[in-house]
Image (cartoon, rainbow, N blue to C red):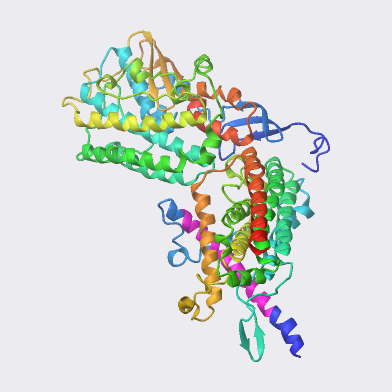
């Protein structure tokens, strides 16, 4: 700074700081151009696209079945949700329903994946605010779930868990016990994270009143998922438009009031407990039966289009698929929750401090793989 | 000849020993930080270099020294090079007045040797002034880097220094009123005469001192100047290799300084628990007992440092200022007044 003539400390009222794309707290290759007045943020502009891989275009070039593993690379934190949304969308297009056994396995896996996603969010969010230890506690539990995934399908992160029409793999011996043990202990583990954060004065100071967005604004901006529910809107696609086997289970939709970072934190913590509740119900009554629906080996949906959305850990994950009757989609469009949620960043950070920017990026729970596709 | 030995040779040997011990402790402290962090975070920490990773600091130091020496383009090279040294040197020279043990230490060949390098009659002021110089190194380093994140980090540390130096000074005054001296040795001796560690007479003063001490050394939850989540690495973002390790050493040496000061001023320095109760005399009945007591107390504070860092989130800049000016400073002033009035009433 000192050597530049046009910008010295005393006459410059604002400086521009480019936060990212190489930055420890932007959760990937997000670039935020911040205009700062001292430490206060005047304006923020998001620059995205550093992780663009043309996923939607690939959806037009690959057959329906081939496209599924590609989607795992979108929101790599919650690959199972991506997979479920797309498989169900194509099934809808084909007018096929997955058998109940497959539906239950899907629910268990998706909810486990929701927990891993929220755990990763909690850990990184806490790191952003300086509480490093929570991260490793979260990873301890996340590891248990990833082991279950690995036992089930061999992969931990990009799982390619389901197939169009059902699931490929039967659950392994001891699966139910392993899941039961996990969901029994898990709520206690969530309490443990809470002891480090929920009533910590510093944590409350850093999150209360930071990144406030009202319910109306949240709806207007298209926020979904915990970011919306933090503002007090009880909108959850699992309840509103049940898919898979969600209508069979009892669970609550947690919602906040103030719409600030603290409320969104509480919402996600409670969602983890509710996910454990869903899993514990589902694992007790997995029905017998086939894993795959009866359908032709070559997937050729009839001409038409479909929009199907599910509640991914980040929000509403929608797929809009246009079929021209061939083996490949004419158009495979994704409505990624992170992308839509990210647009509220600019509004949320205005007037806050630099340290709040990372808190707000964290609270939105974005994944750049999904935003850039 | 005796003069030369007493005033030149022995101090030199002492300085040599203290410097090396402190440097060694700092190295061990980097390992301790990683180990304590690991234990808090249900993992093992460094395990590969030596048994239980005990040689890890050596490996770290070697790695840092072998790294490429990078000075960013446009950096003010002279200040950039000097800044880490300015940060490190004060942290070490403060140890000149820290009393690790009593004045009547032991005798070798007719020469009395005390457990400290020197007993300055304004020891407290010396420590306060010298340790503030260290922050200049941080400010200069951030400024000279010609980069935005370090600049923000440097500005933060400047503000932090101003806000926390004041309550830090006030928090000590209570002790000074009780002891009636600025000499660190005299303060400990006064605690022995009183039969109490001053922490029992000055609990508020101690808490304020330690809180401000943490802020002064830029440690969590007040580690805003380096705040890795928002400022990447704060003032030392552009530093690498050996220069970075100098900053690192300075931070850890400052931690030891603050711990030593807390022990000396509030926790009875080298005194054992219940210093005036003769039933506990056996607690002192082993060689180098004062040093052992001193070290044991320092270790407790160092552990507290690490413990705080790995369990608490970080304050925000404005909250830090608020805590400093709205809570710590008024409390510290009230503490001074209450202490002064009580001393006046009880002694007068």
Instruction: Evaluate whether residue B333 shows in this view.
Output: yes
In this view, which residue lies farthest toward the top? A304
Query: Residue at left 74%, top 67%?
Result: B122
- In screen coordinates, is B332 left or right of A161? right
Up-down relation of residue A335 to residue A9 (above or below)? above
Q: How many marks?
A: 0
Q: Quadrant of the N terminus of chain B?
A: bottom right
- For residue A81, which quarter of the picture? top left
Q: Quadrant of the C terminus of chain B?
A: bottom right
Task: Give the overall secondary structure of the magenta segment.
Answer: helix
Is residue B30 magenta-colored? yes
In this view, which residue lies farthest toward the right? A5
- In screen coordinates, is B297 left or right of B140? left
Up-down relation of residue A15 to residue B243 (above or below)? above
- For residue A292, which quarter of the picture? top left
Image location (x, y in percent) of residue B157: 69, 47
Up-down relation of residue A329 to residue A314 (above or below)? above
Image location (x, y in percent) of residue A222: 50, 17
Image location (x, y in percent) of residue A346: 60, 24
Image location (x, y in percent) of residue B104: 63, 81
- In screen coordinates, is A77 left or right of A221? left
Q: Residue A217 versus residue A306: which sits nearer the camera?
A: A217
Instruction: Evaluate whether residue A368 shows in this view.
Output: no
- In screen coordinates, is B296 left or right of A80? right
Q: Which span of residues is magenta-colored?
A: B12-37
Query: Residue at left 16%, top 26%?
Result: A288
Up-down relation of residue A241 to residue B331 (above or below)? above
Is residue B120 magenta-colored? no
């Amino acid at each position: 700074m000192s050597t530049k003539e046009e910008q010295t400390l005393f006459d410059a009222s604002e400086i521009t700081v480019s936060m990212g794309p190489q930055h420890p707290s932007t959760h990937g290759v997000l670039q935020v151009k911040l205009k700062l007045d001292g430490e206060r943020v005047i304006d923020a502009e998001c620059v995205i696209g550093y992780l663009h891989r043309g996923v939607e275009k690939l959806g037009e070039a690959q057959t329906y079945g081939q496209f599924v593993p590609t989607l795992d690379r979108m929101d790599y934190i919650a690959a199972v949700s991506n997979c479920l949304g797309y498989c169900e969308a194509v099934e809808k297009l084909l007018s096929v329903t997955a058998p109940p056994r497959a539906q239950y396995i899907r629910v268990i896996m998706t909810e486990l994946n929701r927990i891993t996603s929220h755990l990763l969010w909690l850990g990184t969010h806490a790191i952003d605010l300086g509480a490093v230890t929570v991260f490793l506690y979260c990873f301890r539990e996340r590891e248990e779930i990833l082991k279950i995934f690995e036992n089930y399908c061999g992969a931990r992160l990009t799982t390619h868990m389901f197939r169009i029409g059902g699931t490929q793999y039967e659950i392994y011996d001891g699966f139910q016990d392993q899941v039961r043990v996990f969901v029994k202990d898990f709520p206690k583990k969530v309490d443990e994270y809470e002891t480090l954060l929920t009533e910590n004065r510093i944590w409350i100071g850093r999150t209360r009143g930071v990144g406030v967005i009202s319910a109306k604004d949240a709806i207007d901006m298209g926020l979904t998922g915990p970011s919306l529910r933090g503002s007090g809107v009880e909108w959850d696609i699992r309840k509103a438009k049940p898919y898979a086997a969600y209508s069979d289970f009892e669970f609550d939709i947690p919602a906040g009031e103030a719409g600030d970072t603290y409320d969104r934190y509480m919402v996600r913590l409670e969602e983890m407990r509710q996910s454990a509740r869903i899993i514990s119900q589902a694992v007790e009554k997995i029905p017998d039966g086939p894993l795959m629906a009866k359908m032709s080996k070559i997937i050729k949906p009839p001409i038409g289009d479909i929009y199907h959305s599910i509640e991914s850990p980040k929000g509403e994950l929608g797929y809009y698929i246009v079929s021209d009757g061939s083996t490949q989609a004419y158009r495979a469009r994704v409505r990624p929750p992170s992308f839509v949620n990210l647009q509220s960043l600019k509004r949320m950070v205005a007037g806050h401090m630099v340290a709040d920017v990372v808190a707000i990026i964290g609270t939105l729970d974005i994944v750049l793989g999904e935003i850039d596709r | 000849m005796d003069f030369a030995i007493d005033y030149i040779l022995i101090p030199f040997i002492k300085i040599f020993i203290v410097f090396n011990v402190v440097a060694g402790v700092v190295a061990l402290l980097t390992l301790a930080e990683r180990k304590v962090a690991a234990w808090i975070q249900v993992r093992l920490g460094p395990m590969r270099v030596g048994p239980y990773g005990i040689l890890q600091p050596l490996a770290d130091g070697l790695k840092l020294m072998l790294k490429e020496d990078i000075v960013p383009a446009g950096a003010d090279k002279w200040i950039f090079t000097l800044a880490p040294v300015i940060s490190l040197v004060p942290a070490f020279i403060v140890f000149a007045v820290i009393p690790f043990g009593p004045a009547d230490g032991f005798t070798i060949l007719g020469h009395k040797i005390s457990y400290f390098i020197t007993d300055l009659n304004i020891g407290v002021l010396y420590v306060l002034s010298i340790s503030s110089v260290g922050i200049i190194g941080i400010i200069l380093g951030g400024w000279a880097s010609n980069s935005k994140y370090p600049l923000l980090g440097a500005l933060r540390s400047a503000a932090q220094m101003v806000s926390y130096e004041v309550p830090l000074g006030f928090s000590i005054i209570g002790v000074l009123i009780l002891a009636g001296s600025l000499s660190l040795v005299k303060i400990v001796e006064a605690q022995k005469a009183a039969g109490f560690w001053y922490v029992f007479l000055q609990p508020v003063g101690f808490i304020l001192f330690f809180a401000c001490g943490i802020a002064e050394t830029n440690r969590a939850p007040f580690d805003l100047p380096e705040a890795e989540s928002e400022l990447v690495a704060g003032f030392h973002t552009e530093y690498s290799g050996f220069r970075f390790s100098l900053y690192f050493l300075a931070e850890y040496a400052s931690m030891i300084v603050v711990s030593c000061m807390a022990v000396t001023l509030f926790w009875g320095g080298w005194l054992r628990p219940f210093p005036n109760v003769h039933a506990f005399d056996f607690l002192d009945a082993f060689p180098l007992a004062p040093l052992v007591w001193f070290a044991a107390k320092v270790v407790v504070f160092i552990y507290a440092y690490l413990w705080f860092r790995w369990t608490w989130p970080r304050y925000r800049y404005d909250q830090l200022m608020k805590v400093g000016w709205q809570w710590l400073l008024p409390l510290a002033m009230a503490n001074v007044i209450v202490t002064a009035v009580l001393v006046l009433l009880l002694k007068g």
